[in-house]
Structure formats: C-alpha cells, structure tokens
Image (cartoon, helix red, strand yellow):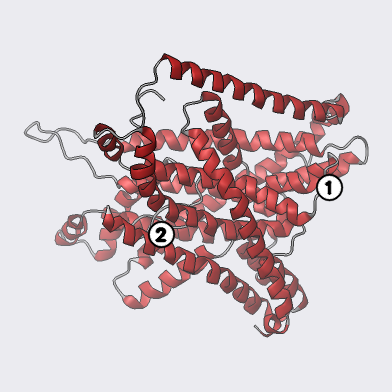
C-alpha cells in the first residue's frame, strides 16, 4: 500500500502491525482451508476411487465425453460471437438511422432484448420456433449479445468528434457509406475492449444450455456423474472440480488477454509523422470506455454514452 | 395472454420467488461485497489475496456451475439444503463478487486530487475517507450497484434449472400446457421482467445525470 495518498507512509510500528495482522489472518485462512480439506478427506473425497474415472480416456474423448462437451461449448460461443458481431453492426446502424420511424422502434426492440434474461429467450426460441436446444442457445445468444454490442457501437459512434461524419459527407460519401467506412471502424476500435469483454460473458452464458438441454460441458458432466455413480463412489465433487478448473483456465486466460489489449489501447495510437515531420494527432479514446474495461467480466447491461454507464 | 391471466396465482408465485431470490441475495451479497471491496484495498496483504481469489474465481465461474455445486455436489457431501436456500447461496456467492467490483470501482472513481487535497489541508485518514472520499464514492457506487441488481434479477432465472419455481418457469410450464398461446405467454413473462428491470435502469440513468453535474 505504499504510495496510497489516503494515509502517510507507514512507520516501523505500523509496518510491524500490518505484518502481524497479515500473518494472523493468513494462518486463520489456511487453517480454515485445511479444516475443509480434512473434512473432505474424512468423507473420502481424495480417495483414489473418487478420481479413477478421470484416467479413462472414454470419459474425456468418448462420444459423450467431456472434451466433446467442451467442443460444443466453444463452438456455440464461436458461432454466437460471430453472429452477435454482425447483428450488432446492423442494430447500431438502424439505431442511429436518420428516420424516426426506424430509430424509435429499433430502440424499443433493443431495450426489450436487453431487459429479459437470456434463458427466457432460449426457451422462447426452443418452444416457439422448435429449433432444437443447440440452435436455440446459439440464436438467443446472438440476439441478446447483438443488442448489447449494437448499443456499444452506437455509443462509440456517438462519442466520435462531429467532424468525422461531416467530412465524410463533405467528400461526397452517402450517409450509409459514411457510417460504414468512417464512423463504424472508429467506434469499433474505441469499444473493442467492451465488446471483447461481452464475448467472454457470452462464453459463460453458453452454460445456460444446461437448462434447455444442449449438450454443453456441464450437461455432459452431469450425465457422466449419473453414469459413473452407478459403478462406484459419488463422483459429483471431483467432476465439479474438473469442470471448475476447465472454466477458470479458459476464462482467466481470456480476461487477461482482454486486459492486456485494453491497456495497450489505452495508450493513444500515433500514426506516422506528417509531411513537415510533426506527429499526427492521436485518435481520441473514450475514457469512460477504458474505465469500463478494467472489469472485463462485468455483465454489461447498460453502456456509456447518452446518460448511461456502468455495468451490472 | 389469456393463459397467463387465467393462471395468475402461478404468475404470482413465480414473481414472488424471483423477488425473494433477488431480495435475499442483495441482502446477503451486498455486505459480503462491501467487505470484499474493503479487504481488497486494505493494507493487510493476506486480506487482499483472499478477496482477490474470491472475486476472480466467482466471476470466472459460470453461474450454472455454481448452482451445480449447491444442487448436486453439496447433497453428496451430506449437506442437504432446501433448493431455494441453495439458490440463494449460489446467487449470493456469484453476485457478491460483482457487488465487490462495483464498490471498488466506485471508490477508485473519486479523483485522486480529492484525497490529495484533503490530506494536504491536514485531514487524517479517517477524516479523508469519512468526509471527502466516501460521500463522493457513494454517488458513483450507487448506479453500478443498481446495475448489479438488474443483472441479478435476470440471473435469478438460472434457478429454474435447479428446481426453483421462478418467473421463467411460469413461461415454461404454461407454454407446455397451452402450446397455441406460447407467443403471448413468453411476451407476458418478458414484460414481467421488463417491469422490474426497466425502471431500475431508468433510475440509474437519472442518478447518473443528476450526480454527474454536481462534481
């Protein structure tokens, strides 16, 4: 905590006190963990017969194995991410259309999509369009995240200097081409960290497929537990730990990537030198957007710009 | 829509459960979140580590997996909970991390010059926090906290997959019985969520507009 402006640099006494507190707390925390582990050990959680199934290749690579579930999870996330990006671009263009007759209904529809749980949308698509669980999950994720990304891109376009659009129109581009070629690419760059963060949330949300019945990893894990429990000790706890490890590994890596990217983009990008040797102006980045991204896992329901902001 | 109107006690039951989960989770999760946020800025290293691990693990685990733990793993360990209680525990664990991050980002959003200025006019740590930083932090904390609650209302729907009868379950059950009215039923349930989330969202907008002017 050196360098905090909130209090003076700690003297020798304060340093000793905080070190003692730290050690005491660490001992208490370790003791609590050890107690929990001991209880689990008494219950047999670490006996070999709770973990032996993980040595069988069938559990990992069989036709209904964990890796197949993981592949489904990742495939759904990938398809939905691409779809959501495309839909997001379409939404953002419609949302900032010049005609009120387009803009207002689209705004209401977007608010509608963002205000309900994704799970409800999955069930709706599953039951009303009878697409099957897999595609219900994909489509619901596309629509829900498309609405959020569309809103992000709109906020990004709104944060651009007015001159960008004006100069696009002035050199004779049509309004649509100005949006597509001048405004959207810049909005995309400004909002990239937010969009990537939302894609991580999308990946986590694929696990809702468990409820509607798409064969993603948690559902597969549950089926494997039910299957192997008939042959031996309860495997639910060990399966939980394995799935937790898989998700933590993927999500923490992705969050870290987003954070690195956000930090890199927070530094203003400079183009090459001008003809007279002076540096070009940096492209302005939305500071609000950068603030958001310190939290790549936040489930963004509302976005900066136009009196909105924060995450939730 | 008629199916919904005819089955209003069912709707009420789902609505009540959604509100109960949201309310109970906020009640338990918010204090834990504030505690975690405090631990993360504390001078004691061990507290910081524990709080960081807690928030990172909770935020990177899908909510479904947390529910899997309370609904299927805990009973195998001999801890048999009521499904509603299990849902509240799962949501509280998951949401506490988001509450913590909202509080922390709120505290961090107070410009550092505020603390520097109050320190340089001779205020102590507690005076700086109590008179200068926290009152301002409260303003910037409230909107993101409400956003967390909005997300929580939507997240409570996951409890449906784990034997708790929430609003989504109403849509599921009724659309099975009244297949021909599925569209209206889902629309009605979606609107039921919107009457919870939209006013809260507007409150956030209002608070942000009102308070951003004053700084």
Secondary structure category for the residue under label 2: helix
Quadrant of the snapshot with the N terminus of chain A: top left
- Residue B145 vs A260, above or below: the answer is below
Q: On the rendered structure, is A81 left or right of A99? A: right
Counting from the top left corner in percent of width and height, residue B190 is at 59, 71
Chain letter of mark 2 equals A
User: Which numbered mark, 1 or 2, is in the foreground of this view?
Assistant: 1
Q: Which residue is drawn at 77% across and 76% down?
A: B177
Counting from the top left corner in percent of width and height, residue A300 is at 47, 53
User: Which quarter of the picture shows residue A279?
Assistant: top left
Chain letter of mark 1 equals B
- Residue B154 in view, yes or no: yes
* Front-lying residue, A53 or A240: A240
- Residue B146 vs A197, above or below: the answer is below
Q: On the rendered structure, is B74 left or right of B23? A: right
* Front-lying residue, B197 or A9: A9
Pointer 1: what residue?
Answer: B80
User: Which quarter of the picture shows residue B208?
Assistant: bottom left
Distance from Cα at disc 1 to Cα at disc 2? 43 Å
Pointer 2: what residue?
Answer: A151
- Mark 2 crowdedness (10 Å alpha carbons): few <14, some 14-19, many ≥20: many
* Front-lying residue, B102 or A147: B102
């Amino acid at each position: 905590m050196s360098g905090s402006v909130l209090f003076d640099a700690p003297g020798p006494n304060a340093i000793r006190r905080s070190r003692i507190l730290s050690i005491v707390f660490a001992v208490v925390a370790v003791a609590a963990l050890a107690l929990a582990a001991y209880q689990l050990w008494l219950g047999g959680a670490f006996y070999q017969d709770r973990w032996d199934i993980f040595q069988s290749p069938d559990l990992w690579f069989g036709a209904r194995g964990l890796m197949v579930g993981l592949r489904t999870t990742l495939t759904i996330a990938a398809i939905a991410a691409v779809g959501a990006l495309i839909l997001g671009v379409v939404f953002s263009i419609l949302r900032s259309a010049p005609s009120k007759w387009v803009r207002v209904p689209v705004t209401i529809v977007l608010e509608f999509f963002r205000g309900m749980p994704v799970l409800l949308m999955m069930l709706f698509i599953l039951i009303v369009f009878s697409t099957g669980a897999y595609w219900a999950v994909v489509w619901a994720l596309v629509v829900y995240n498309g609405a959020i990304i569309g809103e992000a891109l709109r906020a990004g376009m709104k944060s651009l200097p007015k001159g960008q659009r004006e100069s696009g129109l002035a050199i004779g581009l049509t309004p649509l081409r100005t949006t597509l070629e001048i405004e959207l690419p810049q909005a995309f760059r400004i909002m990239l960290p937010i969009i990537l963060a939302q894609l991580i949330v999308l990946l986590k949300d694929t696990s809702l497929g468990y409820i509607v019945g798409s064969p993603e990893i948690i559902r597969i894990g549950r089926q494997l537990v039910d299957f192997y429990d008939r042959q031996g000790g309860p495997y639910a706890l060990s399966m939980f730990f394995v799935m937790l490890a898989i998700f933590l590994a993927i999500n923490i890596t992705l969050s870290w990537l987003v954070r690195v990217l956000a930090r890199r983009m927070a530094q203003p990008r400079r183009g090459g030198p001008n003809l007279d040797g002076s540096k070009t102006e940096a492209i302005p980045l939305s500071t609000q957007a950068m603030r958001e991204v310190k939290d790549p896992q936040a489930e963004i329901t509302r976005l900066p710009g136009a009196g909105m902001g924060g995450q939730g | 829509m008629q199916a919904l109107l005819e089955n209003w006690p069912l709707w009420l039951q789902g609505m009540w459960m959604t509100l109960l989960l949201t309310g109970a989770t906020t009640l338990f999760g918010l204090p834990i979140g504030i505690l975690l946020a405090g631990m993360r800025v504390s001078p004691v290293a061990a507290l910081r580590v524990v709080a960081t691990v807690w928030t990172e693990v909770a935020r990177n685990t899908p909510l479904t997996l947390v529910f899997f733990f309370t609904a299927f793993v805990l009973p195998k360990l001999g801890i048999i909970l009521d499904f509603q209680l299990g849902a509240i525990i799962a949501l509280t664990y998951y949401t506490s991390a988001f509450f913590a991050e909202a509080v922390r980002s709120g505290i961090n959003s107070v410009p550092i010059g505020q603390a520097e200025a109050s320190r340089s006019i001779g205020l102590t740590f507690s005076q700086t926090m109590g008179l200068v930083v926290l009152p301002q932090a409260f303003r910037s904390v409230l909107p993101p906290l409400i956003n967390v609650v909005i997300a929580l209302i939507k997240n409570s729907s996951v409890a449906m997959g784990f034997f708790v009868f929430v609003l989504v379950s109403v849509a599921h059950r009724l659309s099975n019985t009244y297949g021909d009215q599925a569209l209206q039923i889902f629309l009605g349930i979606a609107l039921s969520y919107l009457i919870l989330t939209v006013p809260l969202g507007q409150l956030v907008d209002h608070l942000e507009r009102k308070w951003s002017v004053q700084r």
